[in-house]
Image (cartoon, helix red, strand yellow):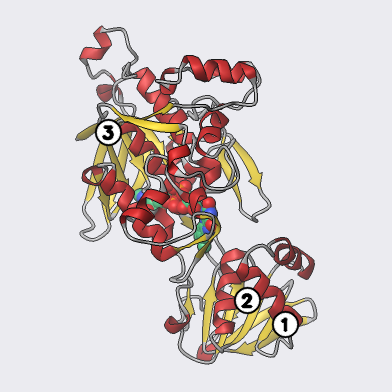
Amino acid sequence: MEHHRVIIAGGGPGGLGVAATLEGWHPRFEGGYEFPSPDVQKLARQHERKPLALDLHELLEKGHRPIEFFRMRHHPVQDALPLDEWTLKFSKRDRVDWLMLTTDGPGGIWNNVPREQLTLGPAHWMELAHYPIAKFYEQTGRERDLNALVHRSDLVPYYQACAEELGLSGHIRTGVRVTGIQPAPDVYSKRESASEESGREDPGARFIVDTVDEVSGEQSAYSCDYLVFAVGPRSSVRKLRVVGVDRDYVSLAYTHPDDYPGERVLVVGGGRSADWAAQELHDDGRTVVYAMRQKSEAHLKLIYNSQYLPYYARWAEILSGGQERMGLLYETQVTGFGSGGLVSIGTPEGPVQVQVDHVVIEIGGDPDYSLLGAYGRLTFHAKRDNFRFQLMQMVVDQATFESVDIPGLYPAGYTAQGTGLSVIGFHAGCFLIAGDILRKLGEV
Ligand SMILES: Cc1cc2nc3c(=O)[nH]c(=O)nc-3n(C[C@H](O)[C@H](O)[C@H](O)COP(=O)(O)OP(=O)(O)OC[C@H]3O[C@@H](n4cnc5c(N)ncnc54)[C@H](O)[C@@H]3O)c2cc1C
């Protein structure tokens, strides 16, 4: 069985940040930085050349959030800092043995979002600190505003460039689906190693990771000592369990108006992804029926709270116009897809039927915690935020992001409790995770 020190499941921004750090790109603090707390400032100065070596429980005990230690250096102010003003720098050290197993290539879910998708926040909020997006724009001749939203066609190449520039690509296996993660049997746990003699933690293989190759169908198993669980917030796509969902006029994800023939389209959803689909189809000249379970107040609140985004300003325009081609059906539930595009919908006024040429279902997903089914009941924290993302996060040690239920397993991205639901909110977690692993291996 192929063994690695660390296996990272998932190639999105969450997994990539940990990979870059384990590859040897270690942060350091430099220049005239200032933390708001004198306690933190003192520790930062003491450890500025090797902050990964610091056990961040020390900060936790003093009442500070360890993730902020790195996040504040990466994003000390609201706007993007010019590169020559960064106080977070990187030194290249030896790599530790890691392997990434992932279905999509670098960038994770961004490989699958609608073709014209823009981010909710500015470019520099989406970046890995190890390879600033300003540098990518410069190196690829893109003249872009770092404080502007990013188009998917810039973001996916950015994450691909991260993998190339940071030397990660050779250790990323794409098209590989992890199908299960289990405790390694004793025979693997008793693996001898030189570092055991040196008194450092070396638990031997803790995990068996089962995979399937998405093209050939070939099944494999790997073992590892540490596992980074970075499969993303939508790795288990929600299913609409109604009759006829497999009809050929029903699509289970939205991509671009050109992919949906016909004039009348029903969009089923109600979150940001469905909003995007309904608006883009409407602005392409289609007649849209938009069915959602929530009440109108909840939807309108999201629209009016998001007016800083051009595509939500557009929603306000659509709503204040005649809405001749946008029919909003609130508090409704699709109950079946019949032949010839006839869709049955339950509404507060009773059942109705609408005839459409195409249906787009965008009802989101959840992290695929079933992959950890072998570990029994896990401890979760229910997270909600103003951006309308919501999910169950794994409860973790806030200084290391190690799961409280599964020693050696680190949820990355925003499946870990204590992160915000955005890349700027979770990226700094990669330093907590990699730092803990490196300290346990005696590599920092
Ligand atoms: C339409 C849309 C717009 C968004 N806009 C923003 C935004 O503006 N700003 C922001 O910060 N966030 C935004 N997000 C949230 C997005 O989730 C984050 O940007 C980010 O991609 C999360 O990173 P991640 O690494 O945790 O997960 P993901 O990006 O989801 O990556 C995880 C990857 O893991 C892989 N994977 C999943 N299951 C398995 C498995 N079983 N085996 C192997 N590999 C697997 C897949 O390749 C998957 O893509 C948006 C999301 C969507 C859908």
Give the image quarter of residue 209. top left
Above or below, 272 relative to 1: below
Above or below, 79 relative to 306: above
Labels 3, 2: front one: 3
Q: What quarter of the picture does the C terminus occupy? A: top left
- The amino acid type, in three-letter code, at marker 3 is Ser
Q: What quarter of the picture does the N terminus occupy? A: top left
235 vs 441, left or right, is: right
Residue 223's disc is 3
Residue bearing the label numbered 1: 351
- The residues bearing labels 3 and 1 have C-alpha atoms spaced at a distance of 53 Å
Q: Disc 2 on helix, strand or loop?
A: strand
Residue at figure coordinates x 63%, y 76% from the top left: 335
Of the residues under marks 3 and 2, which one precedes in the sequence?
3
Of the residues under marks 3 and 1, which one precedes in the sequence?
3
Residue at figure coordinates x 35%, y 23% from the top left: 438
- The residues bearing labels 1 and 2 have C-alpha atoms spaced at a distance of 9 Å
| Image marks 1 and 2: residues in contact by CB distance under 8 Å | yes
